[in-house]
Image: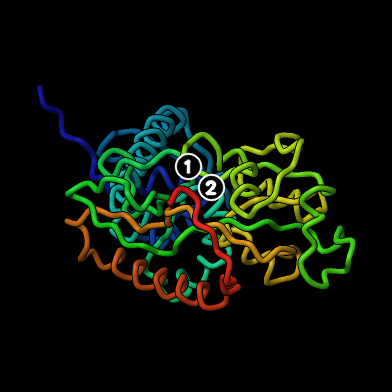
Amino acid sequence: MHQALPALNALRAFEAAARHLSMSKAAAELFVSPSALSHQIRGLEAFLDVKLFDRKGRQIVLTTAGKQLYPGLRLGFGQILDAVEGLRALDTSHVLVVSTPPGFAAKWLAPRLYRFSSANTDIDTRLSSSMVQSNFQSDGVHISIRNLPDSAPRADELTYEKLIDIDYIAVCSPRILGNGGDGPDYSLLQRLPLIHDETLSGRSDILRWQEFLEAIGHRRADVDRGLRFNVADHALDAAVEGAGLLLTHALLAHDDIRTGRLVMPLPDRCEVRRAYHLVYPTANAGMPKLVAFRKWILAEMGATAARMIAPPARDPTFGG
């Protein structure tokens, strides 16, 4: 059998007053006058035919009936609030999720991303870093930066835009240069410890120290020895600290070279017929937040490319 419930406003008035044990504080929370709040509570008491509060001087306390009623209402209003907040959380129209390789995120994108956020205050940008290519349907990713071979197959439903070609350079801390950094010193290839970035390994078109040395016409007996890292920015941090000579992407080392934490002691650069690309579903190409990010990152990458050290005359290509 259906039973009538008290007015919702009266129940809210009681719950707030019971929580604060203050009519004035409850009235302020609900944006009503204390007299209006008291009227609602008196109406609830009349409906339930019980007394919910006693006055102790200038304070109020819950009666036995009030103590019985309050926990259920507190729980109920809490669940209503959670349900409403959960519904609000579904509105992600202002959220842009960008997926990138960890090294690219740490060494290039993250230090610049505040400029995009400052210029687009209506967009909440979330960066997802992973070596695994994102799935645009299941991962909630809107746009991705991917390190792809030039010959990689392209999915028909996706748009691919080249950001910058990848080339490899050797870098180290200026503190460990024996000649003060005056001109190329190929003896570094023999006397400095080698640092290995394992994220560059495992595929035939990825350059390792052995291939780099062969491409520039040098050899080393212990080329497989040295520190190894499976995160690109960790390898770069080790090089900054003077751990040895690191083979890395020119783009990832750019900021450390620009600020003097690293130097490029040799002029040689090796291309590998790979590039960083923007990748996103073609169907979403007109999405305003995606359009804004695409415009920003293309301009930002163009500015970086213009500042990077120009390739020297000898610029061997690996795998070509």
Q: Nearer the viewer, residue 212 or 13?
A: 212
Q: Are marks 2 and 1 in contact (CB under 8 Å)?
A: yes
Residue 101 showing in the rendered view:
yes
Label 2 to label 1: alpha-carbon separation: 6 Å
Classify residue 314 by image quadrant.
bottom right
Classify residue 219 by image quadrant.
top right
Q: Nearer the viewer, residue 37 or 72?
A: 72
Q: Is residue 307 left or right of residue 46?
A: right
Q: Earlier in the sequence, mark 2 or mark 1?
A: 2
Quadrant occupied by the N terminus? top left
Q: Inspect the image, locate mark 2, and give the three-letter code of the amino acid beneath it.
A: Pro
Residue 42 showing in the rendered view:
no
**Can you identify the residue that label 2 sits on?**
102
Q: Nearer the viewer, residue 87 or 51?
A: 87
Q: Is disc 1 surrounded by few (<14), some (14 to 19) or many (20+) residues within 10 Å?
A: few
Q: What residue is rendered at 39% in x and 39% in y?
A: 78
Q: Point out residue 298 in the picture as x, y percentages from the top left corner.
A: 39, 71
Q: Point out residue 223 in the picture as x, y percentages from the top left corner.
A: 72, 38
Q: What residue is rendered at 58% in x and 64% in y?
A: 111
Q: How is the image coloured?
A: rainbow
- Above or below 116: residue 28: above
Q: What residue is rendered at 82% in x and 64% in y?
A: 174
Q: Inspect the image, locate mark 1, and give the three-letter code of the amino acid beneath it.
A: Ser
Secondary structure of the residue carrying numbered label 1: loop
Q: Is residue 118 left or right of residue 31?
A: right
Q: Which mark is residue 46?
A: none
Q: What residue is rendered at 71% in x and 71% in y?
A: 259
Q: Which mark is residue 130?
A: 1
How many numbered marks, from 0 up?
2
Secondary structure of the residue carrying numbered label 2: helix
